[in-house]
């Protein structure tokens, strides 16, 4: 039973990833579709992180001092100013941890 | 593809490029492993999920549904909803891999996670299959080792979400996002996608990530057309 479920999930996930890589599939993305697809990167990045920043325990969290929001703003500003990925991740992680600590103890 | 660089060097370059994401995904892998055995799955089945399905969100949701006694059909349907955003990645990468032999396409298809797709586009140089296979495989290895660690640690694990390591994903994705935000359509895309993602998250829509991506891409595209940019 469990093996069957894992097999089923494997097939579904693999097919979703592989399907459009298959050349025999008679589809050629036209210029409009490619233009549309060019937005997939910002779209997926935003769709993954937005709920992590703004939703905690299934409730909307719009407080400006929300540690996730604060960390995210620091990361965005630091990346914009320096362009250095490692510095951005480290600095914002430290800010996040600190603000979380202050948040929980304050 | 430049032939002056050997395949091994390309694979290492890919491994290095995806390394921050591999590290960031470790807590999630541990979570999947620990949650799996905790919810009553055998260690083998939990590891098998990571080895063969290799899709974090689908794995977590499936384990959760199993725990609450959901049937196979509903779990498979939910998997399809969650995983359907991958159709978009395949479509976007279609032209890159058309001329590759089937075993390459299958391997890259199997390894085509959100992270690999993002890395493929962060890579400034021309498409290189060795680079991608190196990145994809090292990420796969990291995910599975993390799952194993989670299985071994089991219930002895502190609650990982309280450690705040999930923020690492936010920080890395923002670092990847900022350079892309060079024009208004990209901003529109990000706002629409983020807004829809928060909304679908709050109402617990299973395919929320796909819906949000489509909303973001649609708004970005429309904005770009409205500004008179032609599709080339």
Image: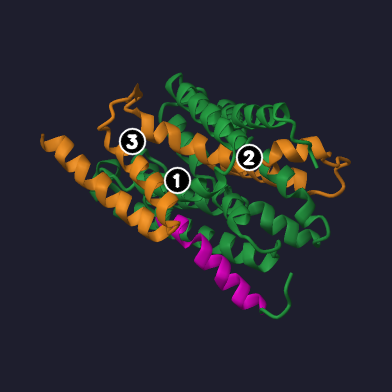
Chain colours: A orange, B green
Residue B75 visible in image: no
Q: Which residues are magenta?
A: B6-23
- Residue drawn at the location 17% of the way across and 42% of the way down: A101
Q: Residue furthest left?
A: A106
Mark drawn on residue A69: 3
What kind of element bears circle 3? helix
Q: Determine which residue is flagged by label 2.
A: A40
CB-based contact (under 8 Å), mark 3 and mark 2:
no
- Residue nearest the viewer, comparing B52 with B90: B90
Tell me if B92 is positioned left or right of B159 in this view: right
x and y, in percent, of residue B172 in the image: 43, 50
- Residue drawn at the location 32% of the way across and 56% of the way down: A90
Residue B6 falls in image quadrant: bottom right
Residue B108 falls in image quadrant: bottom right
Q: Determine which residue is flagged by label 1.
A: B174
x and y, in percent, of residue B133 in the image: 63, 64
Q: Is residue B63 above or below residue B205?
A: below
User: Circle 3 marks a residue in which chain?
Assistant: A
User: Circle 2 marks a residue in which chain?
Assistant: A
What is the quadrant of the C terminus of chain B in the image? Answer: top right
Tell me if B60 is positioned left or right of B229 in this view: left
Q: Residues within 10 Å of mark 1 (few under 14, many from 20)?
A: many
- Residue drawn at the location 68% of the way across and 42% of the way down: A38
User: Circle 1 marks a residue in which chain?
Assistant: B
Q: Is residue A72 above or below residue B72?
A: below
């Amino acid at each position: 039973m469990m093996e069957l479920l894992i097999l089923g999930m494997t097939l579904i996930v693999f097919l979703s990833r592989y399907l459009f890589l298959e050349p025999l599939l008679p589809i050629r993305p036209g210029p409009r579709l490619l233009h549309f697809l060019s937005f997939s990167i910002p779209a997926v990045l935003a769709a993954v992180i937005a709920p992590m920043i703004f939703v905690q325990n299934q409730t909307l969290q719009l407080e400006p001092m929300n540690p996730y929001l604060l960390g995210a703003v620091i990361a965005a500003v630091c990346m914009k100013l320096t362009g250095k990925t490692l510095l951005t991740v480290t600095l914002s992680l430290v800010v996040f941890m600190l603000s979380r600590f202050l948040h929980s103890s304050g | 593809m430049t032939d002056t660089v050997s395949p091994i060097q390309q694979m290492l370059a890919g491994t290095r490029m995806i390394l921050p994401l591999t590290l960031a995904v470790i807590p999630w892998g541990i979570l999947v492993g620990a949650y799996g055995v905790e919810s009553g799955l055998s260690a083998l089945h939990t590891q098998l999920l990571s080895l063969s399905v290799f899709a974090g969100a689908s794995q977590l949701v499936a384990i959760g549904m199993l725990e609450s006694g959901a049937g196979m059909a509903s779990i498979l349907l939910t998997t399809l909803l969650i995983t359907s955003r991958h159709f978009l990645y395949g479509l976007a990468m279609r032209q890159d891999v058309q001329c590759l032999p089937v075993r390459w396409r299958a391997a890259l298809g199997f390894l085509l996670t959100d992270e690999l797709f993002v890395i493929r586009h962060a890579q400034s140089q021309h498409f290189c299959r060795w680079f991608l296979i190196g990145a994809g495989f090292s990420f796969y290895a990291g995910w599975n080792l993390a799952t194993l660690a989670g299985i071994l640690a089991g219930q002895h694990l502190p609650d990982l979400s309280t450690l705040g390591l999930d923020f690492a994903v936010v920080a890395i994705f923002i670092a990847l996002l900022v350079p892309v935000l060079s024009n208004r359509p990209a901003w529109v895309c990000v706002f629409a996608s983020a807004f829809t993602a928060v909304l679908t998250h709050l109402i617990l829509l299973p395919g929320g990530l796909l819906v949000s991506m489509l909303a973001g891409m649609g708004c970005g595209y429309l904005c770009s057309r409205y500004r008179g940019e032609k599709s080339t």
